[in-house]
């Protein structure tokens, strides 16, 4: 991958983030009034006007937009309407909780999903394969909020062995992680199985066996590396979207992370915080995709510019 | 689980149990956990005039004069005595020995500063809280500390409601030292120092805030060692947490969830009507709503008793006019109020020549308890008499309020909180000349305003009652909207906790309001 191609990817990434921020900026301002959200519907009209004036919301939207971009350029992402704290500080305070949730979910997702899919592929059309695939269909067919509430009812209400909201102890992690990892691991199991099946039927696998390699050796040296390319692609997108994907689960389990903050901030029209989170999610997506692109070069020599000639 | 991890778990459990036991020995009052959907963004009433702020208010900041919601009487609070020295001057004696949560003494000077331009002020010299609070205290001209424990409050004109204002929502007085030392209005709003039985111990905006019993409280000690208000947005999770015992109280319960909570051993529904009337408001500029006969037909088509029975299982009231009994002497018990008469509604529509023009009805998804069901039932009731009302579910208040009559705003959902127990703090506040609906052109309320000016601000009770009756009559005749029912606020709670609703948004956890079996 040349410097030019990396630079072009980074430029594309910046344009993506810029468009994302611009879109969110306009939509948030056109779809609700922060003054009413913060002061309440009963608020005196003069109090609402004073709030708008104080936060510059009475200025034309283009004027607000130009100021906003200029401030971002200077590293100022604005202040939350709640407590007048820097939006970056509000978001940074919540980020570790989401990263923990993301990290554990990713470990369980990859740790269960990928081996299960590979195992099913290696035992295609056996009872284990059918059972695994049956479970995966059931798992990813259920939306997260349904799985979450079922787990709450079972472990919180009926058995009363696990807490259902918050993040105070390690026990609080179990249900949210299980909720997110259930569907995600199922997706990776199915994807890994497909990728493996495709590779297992490829001519180079027959060649490898013909060369005298043991089946296990052929799988380890040829099948797994080749199957990993599409899995890494999906894995990159998966990790990138995890911050946003945690939104539903965080709200069901009152998990004090970015997802819950995002929902509350949208409801409150806490503009600076929403925009800060959107930029964070956008940048995460872009960076992980960039890393995936770079990883291709390492995993698949054919994609290395200048080396595939 | 291996032996090692089992041992670690056992040790940890023992450690936690030991810690809890130690804490319990130090203070055997329980720790309350209240699962809510939202937290207040500011703890000073003048910083956030909202039901989520009112919910916690008087547990941490107190009034000079307290309104006892159990008896409907005003009783000493931070002031022990008060008297009108002339028609526009009230003098109060501040209670001795009142400590603020930061250890400073609460004195008359705190009152002067908190009502002064640093926090509230006057029209000409406004503090940061003025815009929100002026509709409560716009009669106050000056607040002056006479000495350490006496305060003088002067009004522009004789104000029959001054005691009422001081004892109501927004009349809470925080301590001044911490305010003056704080890093700005918004930062202070996160850590308000008051004199109440609980003090703010920890606050994580959007996540939780925790109050703890204030040991130096001047009155009867707080019944709970601490109260944690925890944000749990999902209703199912709140109910599950109540049933599993994680939470002692949960808020924002809809009527269709009553059975789940009531059927579970150990949990019950609490709450009921509060001093707030659910209303709908008509934009009289809408082509179909310009004729008052059509608006009266809308009112006559509503069977309020049936609505209350269907949506709330009868667990709230239908008001007789835009008033509540808490108004006290000015409450017009004999006022007839709206009736249900579909035949009269049809006749009015015929007389008005209503041609079936579509009328939009904007509402939110259960911002008010039972809001969606109510909207659907109303649409059916109006349809029965020939009114063509189209439901429009909106995402937020901004969309409800959008000033686009040309695009069809007709009917909107609203509620009318009784800010203080008088029409001035209720119908006049909302439908009067500075209220939202006249300001935004929904209605030309000149007759209503004139009726109010004729005597509502008098100090003579009979003059006030006459003016108020006329206002209520005009409201019925001109029909800028109508009332549906008294707004209820329901909670789920542990059955073992003795607690009842204060009849306002306040969840009162002070001594006398909360007890444990």
Image: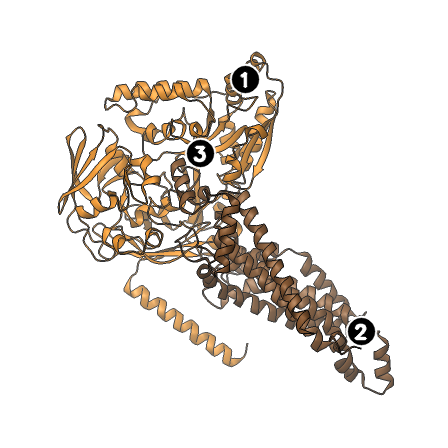
Chain colours: A brown, B orange
Q: Residue at the location (86% across, 87% down)?
A: A211
Relative to B343, residue B109 above or below = below
Q: Which numbered disc flags the more N-terminal residue, 3 or 1?
A: 1
The residue beneath circle 2 is: A199
Query: What residue occupies the far bottom of the structure in this picture?
Result: A212
For label 2, the crowd category at 10 Å Cα-Cα, with few meaning under 14, some 14 to 19 and many 20 or more, is: many
| Circle 1 Cα neighbour tier, 10 Å, few/some/many (<14 / 14–19 / ≥20) | many
Residue B298, position in %: x, y?
53, 22
Q: Secondary structure at mark 1?
A: helix
Corner quadrant of residue A36: top left
Q: Nearer the viewer, residue B350 or B142?
A: B142
Report how far apart the C-alphas of labels 2 and 1 lie in the structure. 75 Å
Q: Quadrant of the C terminus of chain A?
A: bottom right
Give x and y (percent) for residue A85: 41, 57
Q: Is residue A136 above or below residue B497?
A: below
The quadrant in which the N terminus of chain A is found is bottom right
| Position in image of residue B422 (x %, y %) | 32, 29
Residue B511: x %, y % from top left? 28, 48
As drawn, the residue found furthest toward the top would be B351
Label 3 sits on residue: B415
Q: CA distance from mark 3 to mark 1?
A: 24 Å
- Could you tell me which chain the residue with mark 3 belongs to? B
| Camera-side residue of B36 and B248 | B36
Mark 3–mark 1 CB contact (< 8 Å): no
Secondary structure beneath label 3: strand
Instruction: From the viewer's perspective, tell me whether residue A18 is left or right of residue A201.
Output: left
In the displayed structure image, the side of residue A277 where residue A47 appears, left or right: left
Q: Chain of mark 2?
A: A
Find disc 1 in the rendering and name its residue.
B345
């Amino acid at each position: 991958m040349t410097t030019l191609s990396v630079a072009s990817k980074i430029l594309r990434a910046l344009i993506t983030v810029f468009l994302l921020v611009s879109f969110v900026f306009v939509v948030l301002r056109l779809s609700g009034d922060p003054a009413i959200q913060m002061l309440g519907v009963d608020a005196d009209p003069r109090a609402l006007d004073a709030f708008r004036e104080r936060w510059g919301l009475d200025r034309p939207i283009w004027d607000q937009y130009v100021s906003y971009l200029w401030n971002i350029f200077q590293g100022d992402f604005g202040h939350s309407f709640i407590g007048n704290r820097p939006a970056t500080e509000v978001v940074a305070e919540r980020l570790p909780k989401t990263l923990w949730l993301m990290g554990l979910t990713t470990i369980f997702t990859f740790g269960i999903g990928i081996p299960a899919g590979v195992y099913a592929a290696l035992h295609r059309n056996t009872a284990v394969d059918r059972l695994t695939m049956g479970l995966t269909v059931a798992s990813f067919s259920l939306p997260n909020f349904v799985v979450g509430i079922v787990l709450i009812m079972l472990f919180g209400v009926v058995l009363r062995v696990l807490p259902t909201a918050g993040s105070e102890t390690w026990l609080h992690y179990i249900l949210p992680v299980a909720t997110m990892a259930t569907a995600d691991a199922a997706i990776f199991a199915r994807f890994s199985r497909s990728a493996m099946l495709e590779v297992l039927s490829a001519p180079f696998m027959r060649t490898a066996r013909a060369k005298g390699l043991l089946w296990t050796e052929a799988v380890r040296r040829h099948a797994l590396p080749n199957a990993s390319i599409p899995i890494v692609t999906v894995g990159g997108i998966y990790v990138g979207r995890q911050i946003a994907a945690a939104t539903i689960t965080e709200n069901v389990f009152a998990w004090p992370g970015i997802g819950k903050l995002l929902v509350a901030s949208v409801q409150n029209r806490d503009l600076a915080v929403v925009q800060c989170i959107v930029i964070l999610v956008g940048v995460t997506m872009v960076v992980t995709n960039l890393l995936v692109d770079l990883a291709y070069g390492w995993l698949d020599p054919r994609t290395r510019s200048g080396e595939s000639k | 689980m291996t032996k090692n991890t089992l041992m670690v778990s056992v040790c940890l459990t023992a450690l936690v149990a030991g810690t809890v036991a130690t804490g319990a020995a130090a203070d055997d009052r329980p720790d309350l956990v209240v699962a809510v959907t939202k937290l207040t963004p500011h703890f000073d009433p003048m910083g956030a005039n909202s039901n989520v702020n009112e919910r916690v208010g008087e547990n941490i900041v107190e009034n000079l004069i307290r309104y006892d919601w159990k008896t409907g009487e005003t009783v000493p609070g931070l002031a022990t005595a008060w008297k009108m020295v002339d028609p526009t001057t009230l003098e109060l004696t501040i209670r001795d020995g009142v400590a603020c949560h930061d250890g400073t003494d609460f004195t008359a000077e705190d009152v002067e500063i908190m009502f002064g331009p640093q926090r509230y002020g006057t029209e000409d010299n406004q503090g940061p809280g003025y815009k929100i609070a002026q509709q409560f205290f716009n009669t106050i001209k000056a607040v002056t500390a006479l000495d350490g424990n006496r305060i003088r409050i002067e009004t522009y004109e004789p104000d029959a409601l001054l005691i009422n204002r001081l004892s109501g929502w927004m009349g809470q007085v925080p301590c001044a030292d911490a305010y003056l030392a704080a890093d700005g209005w918004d930062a202070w709003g996160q850590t308000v120092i008051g004199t109440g039985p609980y003090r703010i111990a920890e606050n994580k905006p959007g996540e939780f805030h925790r109050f703890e019993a204030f040991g130096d409280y001047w009155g009867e000690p707080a019944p709970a060692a601490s109260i944690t208000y925890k944000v749990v947005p999902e209703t199912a999770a709140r109910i599950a947490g109540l049933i599993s015992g994680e939470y002692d109280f949960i808020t924002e319960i809809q009527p269709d969830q009553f059975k789940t909570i009531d059927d579970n051993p150990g949990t019950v529904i609490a709450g009921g009507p509060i001093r707030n009337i659910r209303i709908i408001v008509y934009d009289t500029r809408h082509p179909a709503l310009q004729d008052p006969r059509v608006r009266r037909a809308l009112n006559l088509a509503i069977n309020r008793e049936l609505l209350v029975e269907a949506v709330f299982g009868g667990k709230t009231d239908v008001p007789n006019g835009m008033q509540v009994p808490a108004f006290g002497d000015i409450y017009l018990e004999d006022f007839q109020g709206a009736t249900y008469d579909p035949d009269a509604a049809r006749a009015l529509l015929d007389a008005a020549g209503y041609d079936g023009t579509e009328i939009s009805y904007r509402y939110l998804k259960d911002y008010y308890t039972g809001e969606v069901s109510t909207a659907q039932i109303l649409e059916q009731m109006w349809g029965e008499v020939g009114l063509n009302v189209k439901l429009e579910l909106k995402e937020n208040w901004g969309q409800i309020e959008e000033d686009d009559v040309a695009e069809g705003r007709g009917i909107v959902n609203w509620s009318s909180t009784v800010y203080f127990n008088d029409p001035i703090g209720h119908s006049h506040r909302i439908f009067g000349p500075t209220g939202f609906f006249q300001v935004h052109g929904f209605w030309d309320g000149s007759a209503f305003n004139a009726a109010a000016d004729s005597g509502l601000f008098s100090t003579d009770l009979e003059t006030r009652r006459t003016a108020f009756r006329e206002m209520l009559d005009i409201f019925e005749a001109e029909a800028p909207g109508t009332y549906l029912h008294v707004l209820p606020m329901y909670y789920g709670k542990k059955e073992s906790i003795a607690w009842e609703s204060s009849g306002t948004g306040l969840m009162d956890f002070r001594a006398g309001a909360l007890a444990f079996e």
